[in-house]
Amino acid sequence: MSTPNLVKCSKCGALMMSHRVCKACGSYNKKEIISQEA
């Protein structure tokens, strides 16, 4: 097995797996996919 390919989120800078929605801010490719509630 290999380690997952981690990249920085273009919106918040958190580490995330490539081609996935960022768990920290809910964005993908600089677009908000999952709205963050307060």
Image (cartoon, rainbow, N blue to C red):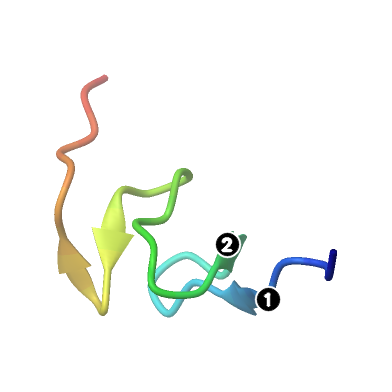
Secondary structure category for the residue under label 2: strand
Q: Amino acid at mark 1?
A: Asn
Foreground residue, 29 or 36?
29
Task: Return the x and y of residue 7 as percentages of the image width and height.
Answer: 61, 78
Q: Quadrant of the C terminus?
A: top left
Q: Which residue is mark 1?
A: 5
Q: Which residue is located at x 59 percent, y 76 percent?
A: 8
The crowding category of the residue bearing disc 2, from other C-alpha atoms within 10 Å (few below 14, some 14 to 19, many at least 20), is: some
**Measured along the vertical axis of the image, is residue 29 above or below residue 33?**
below
Which amino acid, by three-letter code, is at mark 2? Met
Q: Quadrant of residue 6?
A: bottom right
Q: Secondary structure at mark 1?
A: loop
Quarter of the rendering occupied by the N terminus: bottom right
Callout in the foreground (1, 2): 1
Image position of 19 with respect to 15: above or below: below
The image quarter containing residue 36 is top left
The residue located at (16%, 58%) in the rendering is: 32
In this view, the residue farthest toward the top is 38
x 72%, y 67%: residue: 4
Q: Of the numbered discs in the image, which one, if any, rests on residue 16? A: 2
Q: Determine crowd level at label 1: few under 14, some 14-19, many 20+ residues with C-alpha closer than 10 A.
A: few
